[in-house]
Image: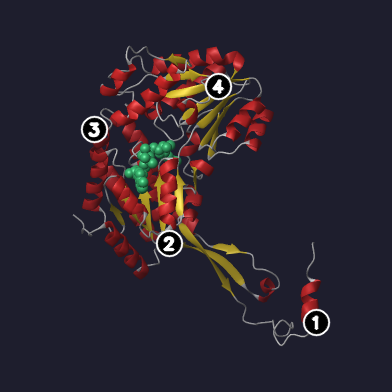
Amino acid sequence: MTQQIGSMAELLHAQQQEHMQHRHVSSEQRRARLQQIIDVVVANYQVIVAAMEDDFAGRSQGFSVMNDILGSLASLKYARDNLDSWMGSDNRQVFSPYDQLGSTARIEYQAKGSVGIIGTWNAPLYTLLSPLACVLAAGNRAILKPSEVTPKTAAAIATVFANEIDPLIVGVVIGGVDVGVEFSHLPFDHLIFTGSTSVGKKIMQAAAQNLVPVTLELGGKSPVIVSNSCDLAETCKRIAIAKSNNGGQLCISPDIIYVPKAHIEQAATLMLDTYRSLFPVITDNVDVVPIVNTAHCQRIVDVLSQAQEAESDVRVSHSVDNLQACVSQDKRLPLHLVIAPNKSTRIMQEEIFGPAAVLLPYDDINDVINDINLRDKPLALYYFGEDQAELDLVLANTTSGGVSINDCLMHAAMHDAPFGGVGASGMGHYHGIEGFKALSHARTVFVAPQHDPRGEWGLLPPHHDQFKDMMVAQVTAD
Ligand code: NAD
């Protein structure tokens, strides 16, 4: 058991004191810290995935190993193996004429200090440890705050870390929203929040009290464009596979799917067929990830019921006598596709975050682009097709956190490329060198030449009329 440190404010203060006394963290120390986290995950993963299985009342351990354990290990190992090149010298061009007088300049990426990391329940380990990889690679310390929606996982993470990791390097605090509120008001040197857009706004407000820089990893309604040029069967298969991932409880899950009007019937059928082939039955099927709890399951059922009451065209992969009964039973829901619902329905307005999607028919790709641009900037955008000119048009005229072409979700698994949102889907990045830089202070270091030429150039006071003339002569547009 490592030492315990009182309140979270005291823990942060103690970490920051340690940081000030040991500001320089060598690459060997950073690698050792990352390796220690990797070793702890490898040694304790069974306890953590068992807790996730309990929290989700049946999320399969195989899925949790793939999603949270392997996902976290991949981020940690990538940071461990690349931090030397990220930390390497970054020389910059000195302005003229100092460049000719022997000046040099460089950027040193300095550890910021202590970073707070608030995670979600849908990927309860990954949303803590994947950002932690860049935090530690950048030489920082961290305090993790797991989601209270998965309390057994939070407790398991806290116990494992308390037993094996020095809290002055990485501490864990657990608790509900009240703890999250207190956490977000602490004077961290950087705060990383993963969660909903609405809570993200509160986090930014709280962080502003102490001018704490924030990385906000939020969500939204990620659109999919099915082009006329695509292989429809393969496209629908891939969308259905992505939609099934974690029971649709993913920040980058396909949400609104734009399909050429002529193909909409066939697309719906193909997606539902794929879903049935992946999951012959839904209830009690361990391959189907349940909705995390009653409240979230009820929210999804309410959204679908409202779409039905609004006389939307709702298709379902597996018939269910009583959707409401699923809420109190095993919380596994079949795939629902809602075709062209009324714009005022909740399913058209809110992030679905469950096993459902909207299908919107279109005739003209420009209408699709306009519709995407009328909405909040999404975390992900997907394009399926082989029409290069159309793809170029889409990429040039939309924005999103990231893009996958001819598949969904894949860009987020890139460890060598930044992951993050834009606008309402977030700000800042982690993963790769961009994550390392986001968690470092980029400090410019200018080295002056031995000879100071300013006097002989007439740049020092007392100034004569020629000084102004010399300055004015340089006001040019070339
Ligand atoms: P949430 O916003 O409800 O909660 C996230 C975290 O914030 C939890 O740890 C919670 O305890 C804490 N929290 C809640 N209210 C708070 C407050 N007022 N002050 C401080 N902390 C508070 O999100 P959720 O339901 O856990 O997760 C689902 C959302 O997260 C979805 O919108 C999803 O798209 C998004 N998400 C984003 C990513 C990403 O990488 N961009 C990844 C996973 C999930």
Q: CA distance from mark 2 to mark 4?
A: 47 Å
- Label 4: which residue? 360
Assess whether mark 4 and mark 1 are in contact (beta carbons under 8 angstroms).
no
Q: Nearer the viewer, residue 21 or 150?
A: 150
Front tag of 2 and 1: 1
SS of the residue at dot 4?
Answer: strand
Q: Quadrant of ligand 1?
A: top left
Q: Specify the amino acid type for callout 1.
A: Gln
Q: Which labelled disc corresponds to residue 54? A: 3
Q: Looking at the image, is mark 4 or mark 3 nearer the viewer?
A: 4
Asked if residue 91 can be seen in this view, the reply is yes
**Does dot 1 land on a helix, a strand or a loop?**
helix
Task: Residue type at mark 2: give it.
Answer: Ala
Task: Give coordinates of residue 99: x percent, y percent.
Answer: 67, 71
For mark 1, what is the residue? 466
Label 4 Cα neighbours within 10 Å, binned few <14 / some 14-19 / many ≥20:
some
Residue 207 coordinates in the image, percent (x, y): 42, 55
Give the side of residue 4 with respect to residue 264, left or right.
left
Residue under numbered circle 2 = 111
Q: What secondary structure is marked by label 2?
A: strand
The percent position of residue 350, horizontal first and vertical second, equals 46, 31
User: In screen coordinates, is 105 left or right of 165?
Assistant: right
Which quadrant would residue 373 be assigned to in this image? top right
The residue depicted at 53 percent of the width and 19 percent of the height is 340
